[in-house]
Amino acid sequence: MHAHISDRLRQHGAKPTAQRLALARVIFERPQHLSADDLFRAALAAGIRVSKATVYNTLNLFAECGLVREVNVDGSRLYYDSTTRPHHHFFNVDTGELIDIPEHAVRLAEMPELPPGTESAGVEMVVKVRKRRS
């Protein structure tokens, strides 16, 4: 994994520092959705000495390099997804949990006409859910 991460970072002109590689171990230990705060807490729990600014910068760099996907759930909450293939999400507004929806489980009947001079870069859907109220 380190070689893959290191290669991707170098391709984008970034150094594969010890802190970046340590954070990558946490991010890619399993498929997951992490906020910057989640990653910061997980890094500290794993004994990684890192500043919050380094976590934010590393996540932004990893997103630029295509190592993680950014998932903006409501304009104020940003998650980083270790699964980069196209897929959709449920977002639980009560718990803040982000859950994968397989790409094949969602079908669009028709794409809207795109603005002139543009092309589709992908479709991502976040379905917001909450506990059913009685």
Image (spheres, grey):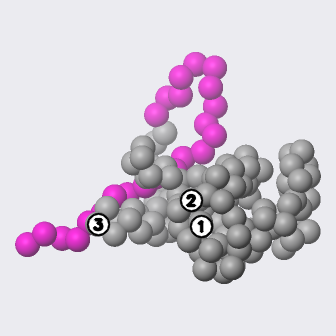
Mark 2 closeness class: few <14, some 14–19, many ≥20 residues within 10 Å? many
Q: Which residue is mark 1?
A: 39
Q: Quadrant of the C terminus?
A: bottom left
Left or right position of 125 against 84: left
- Which residue shows up at 61% across the image and 58% down it? 52
Measured Cα–Cα span from mark 1 to mark 2: 5 Å
**Mark drawn on residue 82:** none
Q: Are marks 1 and 2 in contact (CB under 8 Å)?
A: yes
The answer to which image quadrant residue 32 occupies is bottom right
Q: Which residue is mark 3?
A: 94
Measured Cα–Cα span from mark 3 to mark 1: 20 Å
Q: Identify the amino acid type marked 3.
A: Asp
**What secondary structure is found at the residue carrying circle 2?**
helix
- Which residue shows up at 34% across the image and 69% down it? 95
Is 114 rendered above or below residue 64? above
**What secondary structure is found at the residue carrying circle 1?**
helix
Q: Is residue 21 magenta?
A: no
Task: Give x and y (percent) for residue 39.
Answer: 59, 67
Identify which residue, 16 or 72, lies in the foreground. Answer: 16
**What secondary structure is found at the residue carrying circle 3?**
loop
Identify which residue, 51 or 81, lies in the foreground. Answer: 51
Mark 3 closeness class: few <14, some 14–19, many ≥20 residues within 10 Å? few
Q: In this picture, which residue range is highlighted in magenta?
A: 112-134
